[in-house]
Image: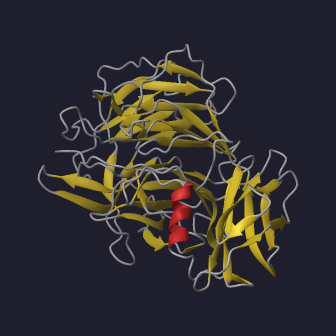
Amino acid sequence: MKMQTIRSCCRAVFYIFVLSLIFTGCGGNDNNKEISGGFVWVAFPEELSVIRGDQARFVLNISSISGIPLPKTASFSISGLPAGAEGFFLADKFYLPANVFLYINTTTDTPIGSFPITISSSQTTEELSITLIVKPMQWEQANVNASDSQPPGLSSHSAVYDEGADQMIIFGGVVPGGLSADLWSLRDVTGTTPVWDQVSAGGSSLPAARTGHKAVYDPDGKRMIIWGGVGQDQDFIVDRLWVLTNADGSGGTPTWVQLSEGAGQSPSSRFGFSMVYDPGSNRVIVFGGAETDGDTTTLLNDVWVLTNANGLGGDPAWINITPASGSIPNPRMMHSAVYDSSNNRMIVFGGSTDSEPLNDVWVLTHANGLDENGQDTPPSWQPLSVSGDLPAARQGHTAVFNPSTNRMTIFGGVDAQGGIVDDLWVIEKANGVEGPNTWSSNIIFHTSKVSYPDARANHSAVINVENDTMAVFGGFLKDTSSNETSSNEAWLLRHASGEE
């Protein structure tokens, strides 16, 4: 079986986007306003979200309505800036036609919110309106001691999170030259003094090196559960199901235990699938992915539940709970899935079909196959109709869910053009219990004025719900020569749900 290699190209920068606007003439924009003397002007974008402390950049495109008008000069001014923000143009006057850049610097004192900005010109009484949206999110690189032992660059690994210990536990993945079977722990990951430890786990046998597997965490039993994956020979792993007991190290030495999947039916070996865990019922839920016989790769949209998933309370056993009717998402791989345990709902975003990436959102109700009384109940899929600007279709991204805000945050991935992206998106009321469901935060532009991780894909992300901090580790990215490389950096996104 040959793994699909994701190829990517350099991402477009802001100025290329602006040039495309200029050469297309900005037609069809409702913000077009005519200036006396045969000119028309438009501001782009009409709305822009930035991280507090960053610089926002807008362009005023002033072009002729017809023919070549006589040159004239114009000056511009703005009003409506929030406190702590400063706006400026690069000159006092500009010869028309022109493309005029407006810069707005925000600071750490700038309030969070949406601010309508008015742009005026000396050549007309007409005004343009733009909207500056200031978001509270803040990226910072985890303050790891550079002299400490650290993992190598990793991608397509697994990561789980113990909130009580503020600890991220990482296993396996792709390393330079092959695959890893190493186990790493990053303690105090969302705190001020994170520390890496390479964990020497016990056990009568150990899981083989792998990639493309998934891991989930039982917070009460302190057990990490891994399933699936692809081995060094690029064949599917035979020893698919393992539990790491005492995973956080607080109850003794972490120890690997291989679990049997039972003699009954079970899901086919696959890669690019998603897996979530319901601690209340001790069930794992697997969705989608891709299977292959070496010649043909088939995408999947089946749903499986593993009972007694942590190895306690009975032998693990698989149940196929794929909905037989109603709306069903397309078969896909390299998507994301998060779980709302309070409402027993799994939320799926994006991924890739045979031909293209996706940006749709689906919710699986009764995701663990049980109702509120613990009785068997068929799950059902619901497509989530989400308003607002939509994120670009993608695969290989990450998603985290904060149940206290009912928001899902996605980051990174590979877009339809094969480019690695670094944008952030947040969906409100993500579990679909009530609406409206809205993509409420989108950070698609940033400058060097703020800390920000490189664009990446096949990384991992976990969330500390209490302090609303998302921790991101690893992934593949582009180096300065546009070669693919893997990262070993950990980054923290404060206010990950987009709320202060």
Q: Nearer the viewer, residue 50 or 183?
A: 50
Measuring from the top left, give residue 148's x and y in whole percent: 54, 15
Vertical arrangement, residue 267 with respect to residue 300, above or below: above
Direction from residue 132 to residue 188 in the image, left or right:
left
* Apparent side of residue 322 relative to residue 17 in the rendered image (left or right): left
Residue 412 x %, y %: 49, 50
Tell me if 404 is positioned left or right of 299 in this view: right
Q: Does residue 350 appear to the left or right of 270 in the view shown?
A: right
Residue 156 place in picture, x, y as percent? 37, 40
Q: Residue at x 59, y 81 (%)?
A: 68
Q: Is residue 340 visible?
A: no
Q: Is residue 357 visible in the rendered structure shown here?
A: yes
Residue placed furthest toward the top = 147
Q: Quadrant of residue 288?
A: bottom left
Closest to the observer: 484 or 70? 70
| Front one among 434 and 350 | 350
